[in-house]
Amino acid sequence: MKDKQKRFFLSESEIPTQWYNIQADMVNKPMPPLNPATKEPLKAEDLYPIFAEELARQELNQTDAWIDIPEPVLEMYKYYRSTPLVRAYGLEKALGTPAHIYFKNESVSPVGSHKLNSALPQAYYNKMQGVTNITTETGAGQWGAALSYAAKVFGLECAVYQVKISYNQKPYRRSIMQTFGATVEASPSMSTRAGKDIITRDPMNQGSLGTAISEAIELAMSTPNCKYTLGSVLNHVALHQSIIGLEAEKQMAMAGEYPDMVIACFGGGSNFGGVAFPFMRHNILDGKKTQFIAAEPASCPKLTRGVFQYDFGDEAGMTPLLPMYTLGHSFKPASIHAGGLRYHGAGVILSQLMKDGYMEAVDIEQLDSFRAGVLFARTEGIIPAPESCHAIAATIREALKCKETGEAKTILFNLSGHGFVDMSAYDSYFSGEMQNYHVSDEDLSKFISSADALNK
């Protein structure tokens, strides 16, 4: 009975063979990244010193809606894709909602999250260019774990700067990266000039993704035959992650439904764009009315309380200037357990789409997110990552609205990863030690103003 089927899979032959590039279909194209010295728009070749050349071209490609997935990457995808689309009957029953709730379960990848979808092509393109070493940053450790594995698959050496608070909170993420052969440094560190400067100013600094990015870029630019890679924010990452939504499109059709709303947690935007963009193209091109909701932490509210302007993507100011919703590149996020969401800015594509009204955002308190995660675990049998708990909390909010109105909406959310190595966070929640963090308007104004001069 189709209406009682719980899981939907694609056959190997049905796995998409192209990524979807939403830039080609956007009514208002994203504004260009700028050279911070000249304020001139960047060309792909300007990014070659930092990124693999094909990734740089993908980053600025605003014309090709479909980009072929290289065969070696597609073969690696087939080890774990398609990921299942699951009807959350247990959660629906617990909420007493008429809503139909589906989730795309990206936690079944070898590294436990969606991050491998971009790590594999990034490692592949670097290998094809003859690069031998890659660097990156990671917050919670999901991206670091994914890139460490992908580097090993394609025979590259990998160095990871992990945000210090997560390095200490999540030791098993560090162990996973080391098991795959990567070197891991707590950021800020004394191994780079950027790190030393931050520690000198603030010896107790617990780090941020912006800081770790600065260190990873510095190492890449000072190491022969080395390139930098990034796990979120950038356009080419969202491109690779579109495999999630492209699969979900086919699977929702198998379920005989189409989402009224699509929800995902939001740090820099990779998993949100991955699940949302293939559906959003139908809003842009076909007049569909699907609602897209980004769930971000209340302690790092770049979409709900930030400002759209040019800003650096890192704390030290080593990246190009990016047009994005930002809290200011010097913003110091609270030490929440959802380490992957502690980033000051939103991706360029997502920022433009937010500005144009194609998506919206909600902020989620830390305690609310874990309350939702525990309910999900008890009804669906999967312990979600702290980041994914934000998407679940937003989904529950919408499902309860349906309960009030009697509307049987179809909700799709992305379960971006599992929380099996985040159990210390759940321990903190159950012990009552966990707390919410509030960012005052005064503090936000101070951090945002640090980027104002960049826009003059």
Image (cartoon, rainbow, N blue to C red):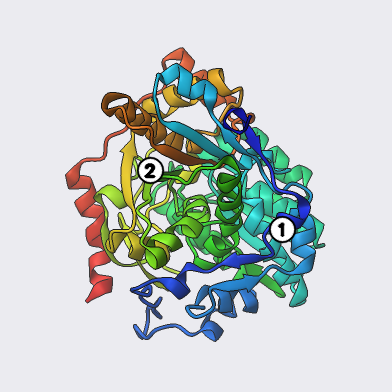
Label 1, secondary structure: give it: strand
Residue marked by disc 1: 158
Q: Residues within 10 Å of mark 1 (few under 14, many from 20)?
A: many
Which residue in the rendered view is the most extreme toward the top? 431
Could you tell me how many numbered marks the image carries? 2
Q: Residue 107 in the image: state x and y as whole percent.
A: 63, 39
Label 2, secondary structure: give it: strand
Picture layout, residue 181 above or below residue 411: below
Picture layout, residue 402 above or below residue 66: above
Question: To which quarter of the image does residue 140 belong?
Answer: top right
379 to the left or right of 349:
right
Q: Residue 324 in the image: state x and y as whole percent.
A: 34, 64
Depth order, front residue of 50/253: 253
Q: Residue 253 in the image: state x and y as whole percent.
A: 57, 48
Q: Quadrant of the N terminus?
A: top right
Which residue in the rendered view is the most extreme toward the left? 442
Depth order, front residue of 83/391: 83
151 to the left or right of 218:
right
Circles 1 and 2: CB distance less than 8 Å?
Answer: no
Q: Amino acid at mark 1?
A: Cys
Q: Residues within 10 Å of mark 2 (few under 14, many from 20)?
A: many
Q: Quadrant of the C terminus?
A: bottom left
Q: Disc 1 to disc 2, how far (Cα)?
A: 29 Å
Q: Amino acid at mark 2?
A: Glu
Task: Please say whether residue 191 is visible from this viewpoint.
Answer: no
Q: Residue 9 in the image: state x and y as whole percent.
A: 69, 43
Residue marked by disc 2: 296
